């Protein structure tokens, strides 16, 4: 089950970090684009907000959570700007959902636009969320929930271990470029156009990243109230699943660890024996 805006430990750049005292969360419009004409990314009180075709129905993240079989937790926005693989070429990504009229592609860069590397084109059919579960894909009254096609394989992020990179969404229809790092040079917006959710209980770092694909010109009005302009701020335009592989210790590393543990155990036994002699 998706846990909306619940904060815990976040992994950013594949390192465990504790959350700050004040959460920094980009607000998300919970009705879905077009006044409910699109399935919402996050739920309001359990489901998408009333109105439109998807009012009161499950959110995109609820569906993905059910498909993965694990809960999702919102990641603080200050922690999802830079990423890195833990091993060379150790990141993989695939497209999960699209509710957008514009055509876009996902990529990454270690520098700026000049170092941009394309990862994948987002699937062409609009208003779709992809799942592995046949039961979810075959559910009645859920025509926008479809099974992953056979050719929809994971794409590798070919970056060396610990080289920081930023994700990039390129809106090819509007010729706009958005980065996971707000304010990054040569990109088209200083505001946060990507939000991140951690998949809880996974062996390796596992995330869902979601994008707003139009330039946000305003996030709040003068009173501080959420009032999005230039875009609809629903962040359901393009949704991706990301996995980062943890390094596996070499046999020699395991041997050293075993020797270290054995040494600790021996020292503890000697300490207990010495205490016993002193007590006696």
Image: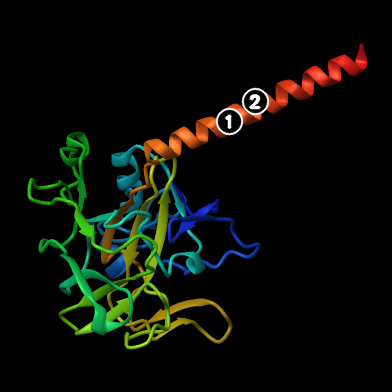
Residue 265 bears which disc, if any?
2
Dividing the picture into quarters, in which one does residue 168 lie? Answer: bottom left
Mark 1 neighbour density, 10 Å: few (under 14) some (14–19) many (20 or more): few
**Front residue (pair 197, 29):** 197
| Residue occupying the point 26% across, 67% down | 237
**What scheme was used to colour the molecule?**
rainbow
Q: Which residue is mark 1?
A: 261
Q: Position of residue 228 (x, y in %)?
A: 41, 78
Q: Position of residue 61 (x, y in %)?
A: 35, 51
Check if mark 1's residue and mark 2's residue have beta carbons within 8 Å.
Answer: yes
* Quarter of the image with the C terminus in it: top right
Asked if residue 114 is positioned above or below residue 144 in the image, the reply reads below
Q: Position of residue 182 (x, y in %)?
A: 42, 79
Say whether residue 258 is left or right of residue 237: right
Dividing the picture into quarters, in which one does residue 99 lie? Answer: bottom left
| Residue occupying the point 51% across, 84% down | 221
**Front residue (pair 19, 226):** 19
Q: Position of residue 19 (x, y in %)?
A: 59, 58
Element carrying mark 1? helix
CA gap, disc 1 to disc 2? Answer: 6 Å
Say whether residue 163 is left or right of residue 139: right
């Amino acid at each position: 089950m998706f846990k909306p805006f619940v904060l815990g430990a976040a992994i950013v750049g594949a390192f465990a970090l504790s959350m700050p005292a004040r959460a920094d969360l980009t607000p998300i419009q919970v009705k879905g684009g077009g006044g409910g004409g699109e399935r919402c990314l996050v739920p309001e009180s359990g489901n998408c907000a009333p109105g439109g075709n998807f009012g009161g129905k499950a959110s995109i993240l609820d569906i993905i959570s059910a498909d993965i079989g694990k809960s999702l937790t919102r990641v603080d926005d200050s922690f999802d700007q830079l990423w890195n693989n833990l091993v060379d070429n150790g990141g993989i990504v695939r497209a999960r959902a699209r509710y957008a009229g514009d055509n876009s592609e996902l990529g990454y860069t270690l520098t700026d636009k000049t170092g941009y590397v394309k990862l994948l084109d987002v699937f062409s059919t609009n208003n779709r969320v992809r799942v592995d579960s046949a039961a979810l894909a075959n559910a009645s009254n859920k025509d926008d929930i479809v099974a992953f096609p056979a050719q929809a394989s994971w794409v590798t992020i070919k970056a060396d271990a610990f080289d920081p990179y930023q994700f990039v969404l390129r809106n090819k229809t509007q010729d706009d470029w958005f980065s996971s790092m707000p304010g990054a040079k040569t990109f088209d917006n200083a505001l946060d156009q990507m939000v991140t959710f951690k998949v809880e209980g996974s062996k390796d770092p596992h995330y869902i990243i979601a994008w707003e694909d139009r330039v946000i010109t305003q996030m709040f009005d003068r009173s501080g109230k959420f009032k999005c302009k230039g875009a609809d701020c629903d962040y359901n335009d393009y949704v991706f699943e990301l996995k980062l592989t943890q390094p596996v210790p070499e046999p020699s590393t395991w041997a050293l660890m075993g020797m270290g543990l054995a040494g600790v155990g021996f020292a503890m036994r000697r300490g207990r024996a010495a205490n016993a002699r002193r007590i006696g």
